[in-house]
Amino acid sequence: MRDDFVLRKGSEFQAGGVSSINWSILSISRFILALIVASSHMRWIDATHITSFIASFGAKTAVVGFFAISGYSVTTSLDRNRKGFVWRRVIRLYPAYIAAMLFGAALQLEIGSRQVGDNLFRADGLGIYICNMLMLQMYACKAVSYVPTVWSLSIEFSFYILIFLVGSRFSPILWLAAAISAFHFLLPRGIIEAEWYDILMKLNMVRYFWPFALGVLLARRRDVLSSVVAFSGTILIFFDSNSPPFGVVTFFFSILAIELARRGVGVNRPTWNFLGDTSYPLYLIHPPIILICFELGWTDAMFALLLSIFASVVVFWYIERPVSKAMKKHGATFFRRYRE
């Protein structure tokens, strides 16, 4: 959900030899995708607001779009500088992640289990929280109920490790993995009444790898064929039985954003960059904010959404930003001493 590029000059982001990419486009795209996810969950308290229309663009499809943009961003980062890649990903993911988990745990201690709309905020045990902190949710345990959106983060982190281990080329291994993932994505749920099929359908790392792979492809190849293959992913969304009415638009928009960004279209927009910075906290923090609104009787969806956006700004500015800087500084010192 994050990118590694922070050095900007005019309309260009300087990332080694990659100086013509307009990362502002991907920043605002990430914010829009996070807005779709948050709006989808606003229906827990208010299904009559305009947020319900925004939700029709599909929360799960927005996550698929996130994976595609993430694949492009982190692959460009990896190819720019392989050294310290995993640590850079930890710095990007964990400050806001820890803040959201602590916020959820504090609410759980105060409220306990609570049903809000179609979602159950369950009082999870310490073991579940520890498992989630190790990024093992969806593998060794379920996602924390108070921050349910973290289900995708362990999967995304697995993709980071995979692309790091595979190397600097889009190898046949990735092509094969992407093809298997695309096939898995189209498998209907419940078509076979068997335990092995239920387990197969829960392999989300397999199910959601193909959009990440498309992002990798766009980062490493600039020919017309790569663009055609990437946009063809829209067909998978079209034939997905679980796709919402405008899910196709959401995915097409995500690939188009990558295409425009990698061609350097447009100019650098600081406001878009800032909104992109808040998209990750917004993705994490909005479920517990919805619960707070529910507890206080504030059931207007737009108010809850605006409050979530405000909270995401606070998390980014006063927690994520300073903690990331500290981790980067002390991490560099530690590794420098280790090498010596």
Image: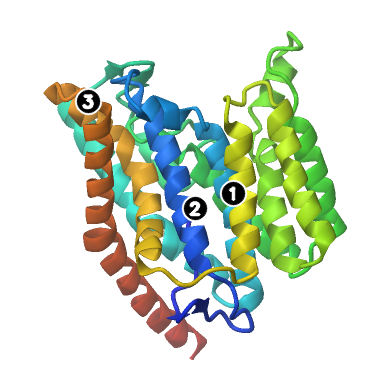
Mark 1 surroundings: few (<14), some (14-19) or many (≥20) residues within 10 A: many
Vertical comparison of 303 with 196: above or below: below
Q: How has the structure been colored for display?
A: rainbow
Q: Secondary structure at mark 3?
A: loop
CB-based contact (under 8 Å), mark 1 and mark 2? yes
Q: Could you give the CA–CA distance between mark 1 and mark 3, rounded to whole angstroms?
A: 29 Å
Q: Which of the 4 image quarters holds residue 76?
A: bottom right
| Residue at which label 3 appears | 300
Q: Secondary structure at mark 1?
A: helix
Q: Secondary structure at mark 2?
A: helix
Residue at the (75%, 31%) spot, across then down? 184
Left or right relative to 125: residue 24: right
- For residue 160, say whether it is visible: no
| Residue at which label 2 appears | 29
**Of residues 278 and 261, which is closer to you in this image?**
261
Residue at the (27%, 20%) spot, across then down? 113
Outermost residue on the bottom side: it is 340
Q: Could you give the CA–CA distance between mark 1 and mark 2, rounded to whole angstroms?
A: 7 Å
Residue 5 drawn at (x, y percent) = 49, 72
**Of residues 124 and 223, which is closer to you in this image?**
223
| Residue at which label 1 appears | 254
Residue at the (81%, 66%) spot, across then down? 223
Q: Which of the 4 image quarters holds residue 289?
A: top left
Q: Which mark is residue 45?
A: none
Residue 10 drawn at (x, y percent) = 45, 81
**Of residues 188 and 275, which is closer to you in this image?**
275
Specify which label sits upstream in the sequence, 1 or 2: 2
Outermost residue on the top side: it is 193
Q: Which amino acid type is marked by label 2?
A: Ser
Q: Could you give the CA–CA distance between mark 3 and mark 2, rounded to whole angstroms?
A: 25 Å
Residue 202 drawn at (x, y percent) = 63, 27
Specify which label sits upstream in the sequence, 3 or 2: 2
